[in-house]
Image (tube, rainbow, N blue to C red):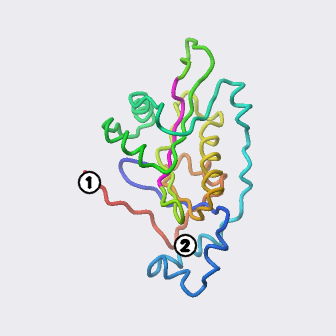
Amino acid sequence: MRRDGFQRNAVSKGLGFDDFFTKKPDNRRQSFGTGQGNAIGRILERCKPRDLRLTKSNEKFREEGIEFVEGYEDIDLHALNELFVQVKFPRREPSRLRMALKNSYSVLWIRYTKPSNRFVKQGQLLGFARVISDGVFYASIWDVAVVPSWQRIGLGRGLMERLLQKLVDDGIPLITLYAERDVVGLYEKLGFKSDQRGMTGMAYALR
């Protein structure tokens, strides 16, 4: 997410989209409010089912000293804030950040597990992402971040694939995110679509 605004909204088609929107055809659009249902419907018609198998297994990552960790309990908040700063996200007040993590639907992060060397320390936080969701209809992915020197080797994709797999397995049909321009291509490869004609991502932010 950019601090100076939002890019276009992106939507991924997950398991159960057709059932979700067609089981009750009489009210399937009204449930989204006037006009919104038509825009969502257009996005869904353009989306195609994705193969959500992992492109790289946990075992392969572990061989390289990379571990994906679920949950927020063991996260070093100072290290997480440092990661945010490195990728130009705002630093968050620690107690509020802890509450945000606690209230998240899912938290996934990456740590380095091999012995320390001059480039990386054992246990170092390398990547992070989290999900906000009602657990039934909607989910939104936020704060996807990877240490810059560890980017472009599949860690960001690894985070996204594992979060999407969980959300699809949980039966959540509509998954959204806000993307900076330079990572739109990654999200499109994962099945996300932007809609230029209908819905527009908007935010009300207190400064």
Q: Position of residue 127 (x, y in %)?
A: 54, 34
Question: Is 142 left or right of 61, judged from the image as shown?
Answer: left
Q: Tell me the kind of residue under disc 1.
A: Leu
Q: Position of residue 90 (x, y in %)?
A: 36, 40
Q: Which residue is more in the foreground, 182 or 207? A: 207
Q: Which mark is residue 206?
A: 1
Residue under the image location 49 percent in, 57 percent down: 133
Residue under the image location 50 percent in, 56 percent down: 140
- Compared to residue 163, the image places residue 32 above or below, namely below
Q: Which residue is more in the foreground, 93 or 193? A: 93
Q: Position of residue 148 (x, y in %)?
A: 52, 31
Q: Main secondary structure of the magenta part?
A: strand
Specify the quadrant of the image occupied by residue 117: top right
Residue denoted by label 2: 40
How much space separates mark 1 and mark 2, taking CA atoms?
Answer: 27 Å
SS state under label 1: loop
The region drawn magenta spans: 124-132
Residue under the image location 65 percent in, 33 percent down: 153
